[in-house]
Image (tube, grey):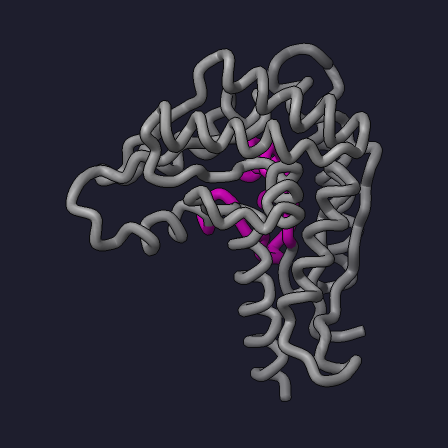
Amino acid sequence: MKNFFAILGGMGTLATESFVHVLNERTPNHSDQDYLNYVLINHATVPDRTAFILGKSEKSPVAALKEDIRQYSTLEPRFFVLTCNTAHHFYDELVETTTTPLLHMPRLAVQAVLKKFADLERPIRVGVLATEGTIQSKVYENELNSYTNIETIIPNQEIQQQVTHLIYRDIKERNFLNQELYFSILDQMIREQQCDVVLLGCTELSLMQESTKNAAYSVIDAQSELVDETIRLALEYRQADS
């Protein structure tokens, strides 16, 4: 197979499944041949990223991810897609493993925030919802704070606990898409924390957004932005080779 990309997934598997579903759904198509060429790496046994970042586990995910990148770089994909937000904490280490481009989901999401609020004449209040590992490692906070016209809002302890429960207890452990809790969290961030927009920095939250088709609350979904950039690049390469 030529002119394809590689998806580094499995963190978790349901979130990866959601990414692939949205990717295929948004790809312009009139026949089987219009869909994109890609290799899906569902490496479900990659050690937990959040547990390692928080010091709750000594098992680093870096070795497993580097192994995937080295192994599939030999197939010469056009680019890699990393579907786990928390894993972007290790982005600089991972890109040293290959000369193949690796898309950066948090940067794409922040660019979407800036575009959405380009006409706002005051700082954009951006609430970040993510795993505790992503929050503590400041994967999104650092990207957001590099812009003077953005004010980053990190959830308080009570809201963060609710986010953690939604991601781990409900989705990862029980495969339960708890819509009531999801909308409650969004409501607290928008109304109580007075955020202009909530940035979804976890693929399980992207799964919630996709399943609910939420339009009531202002949201930027990092996975959605990654899907759009993946399609744009893949079609660009295809056209260049045609």
Where, quadrant-wise, is the N terminus in this rendering?
bottom right
Instruction: Write the residue at 67% across / 19% down.
Output: 52
Residue 48 in picture, x, y percent from top left: 73, 25
Where, quadrant-wise, is the C terminus in this rendering?
bottom right
Residue 83 in the magenta stretch? The answer is yes
Instruction: Write the residue at 81% across / 41% down.
Output: 43
| 215 relative position to 80: left or right | left
Residue 23 in picture, x, y percent from top left: 66, 61
Q: Nearer the viewer, residue 22 or 189?
A: 189
User: Which residue is at the far left?
Assistant: 121
Q: Nearer the viewer, residue 108 or 161?
A: 161
| 19 relative position to 117: left or right | right
User: Which residue is at the far bottom?
Assistant: 242
Residue 107 in the magenta stretch? The answer is yes
Instruction: Write the residue at 56% across / 39% down.
Output: 91
- Indicate whether 64 appears above or below 51: below
| 62 relative position to 140: left or right | right
Residue 153 in picture, x, y percent from top left: 36, 26
Instruction: Write the residue at 65% across / 55% down.
Output: 80
| 218 relative position to 169: left or right | left
- Indicate whether 156 appears above or below 170: above
In the image, which residues are magenta? Answer: 81-108
